Amino acid sequence: MSILVKHPGLFTTVQDQGRHGYQKFGVVVGGAMDLFAFRMSNLLVGNDQGEAGLEVTLRGPELEFLADTVIAICGGDLSPMLDSKHVPMWRPIYIRKGCVLHFGAIQTGCRAYIAIAGGIDVNHVLGSVSTYTRANLGGFKGRALQKGDILPLKEPFYTIEKYRQQFNLIKDSSVSISKFSLNHKVLPPYRNNPCVRFVRGRQYDDFSSEAKRRLVTSSYRVSSKSDRMGYRLEGPALMLQEPKEMISETILFGTIQVPPDGQPIILMADRQTTGGYPKIAQVIFVDLPILAQVKPGETLTLQEVSLQVAEQLYLKQEATLQFMQKRLRLYWETGVLINQK
C-alpha cells in the first residue's frame, strides 16, 4: 500500500503530534500546526490520534493512491477533489486504487491535514515522525514531499473489507462518502482575521501601560515573513517600561515574545527551544488551531482571558476529542452512530 506524489504542492510534509521530551537538549518539538484538525482527521479514519499524516500548506499536492483505502481531510478548506469531483471535509472517504486527490483554490484557512487509514509508514526519529526541514529531521527523508516520491502506508487498524461494509459501497463507485457526519459545533471557530485569546506572559508587568492597552485594542497583520517557526506581527509597537536584559528561557507554542523593535512574534510549532526576548503573552491552547489557519497578510486581534478560563476550555476540547474517539470506534466496529454532545 502506498501513495504516489504526482505533484508536491507548495509545502507538504509528514507530521504527527511532535517530538516531545527533547527540548532540554535543544531539539525542536515541531508537529502539526493545527493539532485539532490533525487529531480529528486520524480519528475519522480509525487511527490513533497521533498517527503520521500529511500537512498541506496553501497549495495542495496531487496524490495518486495505489491501493484501496480510506482518508479524511480536515483543517483549512483548500477545495479537495478526487478525480476532479469535489469531496467534503471532516468526513471519512473511501477511495479505490488509482484515484487521484488534488486541490483547488483556498476557501478558508491555509493548512489542511490528510489522514490515511493505517497512517504513513516512515521511521521514528527521537520518538516522532514529524518533519523538521531546517535540520533534515524526521518525516519522509527529512524534507517536504517532491514529485515522484512514493509514500509507504501501514496496514489499517480495520480491514478494507470492514470499511467496505460500513460504506455500503456501490460496486463500480471509485469514491464513496461515509454516512458518518461530524457536527461542526465541535470544531474550533475557524474564521478570517480572527480574535485569538491569551493569558499573561512571564514579563507582562515589565511592559508599559500603553503597550498593555495596545495589545488588546489593536489589530496586527501577519507578515509575509511568517512560517512554521513563528508569525511576525506588524502593528503598534509594544515597548517595555525600561530596557531589560534577560536570561534565555523555555518557550512554548503560542508564546508571544517582543524584540527591541516592539513588533511581536508568536512562536509556532517549529519554534526554537529557548528565547531571550520578553514574553508579554501566551496564546491559549484551544486557540492555537485558529492561529495556525491564519494566512500571511491577514490580521488578528488579541483578547485576554484568565488562566482558569483557559484551563476550562482546554478540558472541554479534550473531552470532545475523547468522546469522538469512542463514537468513531463504535461506528467502525458496529456501524452504530451515537449522538454527539
Image (cartoon, rainbow, N blue to C red):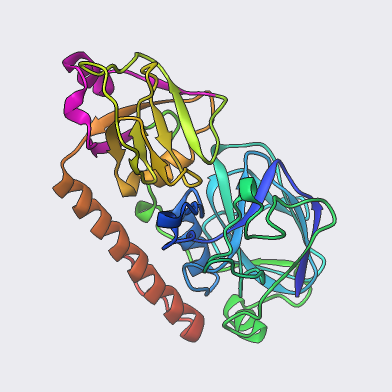
**Quarter of the image containing the C terminus?**
bottom left
Q: Residue at x 66, y 69 (%)?
A: 122
Q: Is residue 235 left or right of residue 213?
A: right
Q: Is residue 98 above or below residue 251?
A: below
Of 210 and 5, the residue lying toward us: 210
Query: Within the magenta stretch, is there residue 187?
Result: no
Query: In the picture provided, is 62 more to the left or to the right than 38?
Result: right
Where, by quadrant of the figure, is residue 201 drawn?
top left
Picture coordinates of residue 105, whole percent (x, y): 67, 36
- Whether residue 190 is visible here, answered yes or no, is no
Q: Residue 87 placed where, x, y %?
A: 64, 54
Give the residue at x 75% y 78%.
Answer: 171
- Residue 284 visible here: yes
Pick out the residue farthest to the right.
Answer: 148
Position of residue 188 relative to residue 107, above or below, is below
Q: Position of residue 286 (x, y in %)?
A: 33, 49
Stretch in magenta: 196-223
- Note whether 237 is above or below 186 in the view shown: above
Which of 231/2 is in front? 231
When asked about the image quadrant of residue 1, the answer is bottom right
Residue 301 placement, left or right of 107: left
Q: Name the residue rendered at 24%, 59% in the picture.
A: 315
Q: Vertical placement of 131 versus 107: above or below?
A: below
The structure residue drawn at horizontal position 70% and vertical position 52%, both measured from the top left corner, is 143
The residue closer to the viewer here, 52 or 138, is: 138
Q: Measured from the top left, where is residue 98 in percent x and y? A: 82, 66
